Image (cartoon, grey):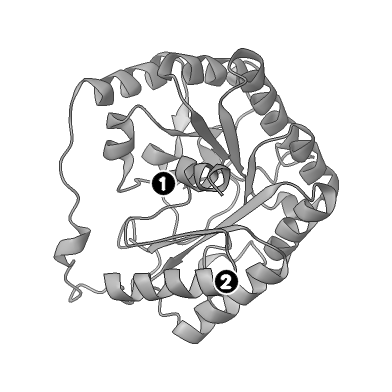
Amino acid sequence: MKTHIKKPDWLKVPIRSGENLQTVKKLLKELELNTVCQAANCPNRMECFSQRTATFMILGDTCTRNCRFCNVSPGRPGVPDPEEPRRLAQAVVELGLKHTVITSVTRDDLPDGGAEHFARTVAAIREVKPETTVEVLIPDFKGDRRALATVLAAKPDILNHNLETVPRFYRSVRPQADYQRSLEVLARTKEIDPGMYTKSGIMVGLGETEEEIDALMDDLRRVDCDFITIGQYLPPSQEHYQLEEYVSPETFAKYQRMAYRKGFRFAASSPFVRSSYKAAEMLDSQDQR
C-alpha cells in the first residue's frame, strides 16, 4: 500500500466490546464455525458481533484461489465437514438471527464447487428456524450451471455473487476469476428462478474511474441484478493489492444516487459497506414496498 496515503477520519473504527460480542465469539468457537468477518478482517466485525450477527463461512477456511485483495488464506483445503450445516443452523437458533448470510471459500477442488454443501446448509436452517431469511454469497462455481441450480433449489431468499471490481483490474486483482462469467452467474440465476433477488458488490479505491463504475452498474442492470453494495477497499497487508485512494463519502453518495437512477431496488454505498453489512435491511426494504 502507498505509505503516503493517510487514512482519513471517516475510516476510523470505534472500539467495541460487551456481552453480545463475547457471546458470539464464544459460540462460534464452541461450534467450530468460521466467519468471513474474522477471516477477511472485516472492519465491521466488532459492530456485527456486538449485535449478535455474523456472516458464516462454510467449507473450511482455506481457499483454492489467491485473489490479491482478500485476507482468506489460499492453499489446499480439507474435506468438507458433513456436520457443519447442522452446527451452523444451531448457531442461527442460539443467536436468534432474523437474517443470516452464508458464504464460503472458493472450492475449485470439489466437483460441484461446494454447491451441495450450500444447499444442505440452507435446508438445515429452514428445518430449525424457517422464519429466518437466508442470503447466500456464492463463488462462481467455474460457471457450472448445475451447481448454481443446486443452490437455488434450496430456495435462499437472496443470491449474492460479487463482481468485486471493474473488468480492467481482474487480471491483477482476481486472476482466477472472469468478469463475464460472474455476470453470467447472476443472469443464469434469474433464468433458473426469475423471482430470486440477486445482489452483487464491489470495492472502490483501486484506481477505477467513475465511468468504469457507471459501465459496471449498467452491466449488472442488464442481467437484472436487484441490489448493489459499494465499499472502500482496505488492503489487509503490504503484500496485498496496492491501494490507490480513499474514496470520499461524497463520491460514495454519488454512486448510490447513480445506482438508484439505473433502477437498482436497493443500493448501499459508503466507506464501511461490505457485501453482508446490514444485509437484512435490503430484504426488509422490499417488504415495505
The answer to which of 172 and 47 lies nearer the viewer is: 47
Residue at figure coordinates x 34%, y 23% from the top left: 24
Query: Residue 249 placed where, x, y %?
Result: 28, 69
Query: Residue 4 placed where, x, y %?
Result: 17, 76
Mark yes or no: residue 77 visible: no
Q: Tag 2: residue type? A: Tyr
The quarter of the picture where the N terminus appears is: bottom left
Q: Within the image, what quadrant is residue 182 found in?
A: bottom right
Query: Residue 98 placed where, x, y %?
Result: 48, 27
Per the image, label 1 sits on a secondary structure element best described as loop
Q: Tag 1: residue type? A: Tyr
Question: Is 124 left, or right, of 267 in this rendering?
Answer: right
Q: Within the image, what quadrant is residue 191 found in?
A: bottom right
Q: Within the image, what quadrant is residue 112 found in?
A: top right
Per the image, label 2 sits on a secondary structure element best described as helix
Q: Are marks 1 and 2 in contact (CB under 8 Å)?
A: no
Residue at figure coordinates x 36%, y 70% from the top left: 252
Q: Is residue 278 above or below residue 262?
A: above
Q: Name the residue tied to disc 1.
A: 277
Q: Is residue 173 above or below residue 121?
A: below
Q: Name the residue tied to disc 2.
A: 170
Question: Is 238 left, or right, of 170 in this rendering?
Answer: left
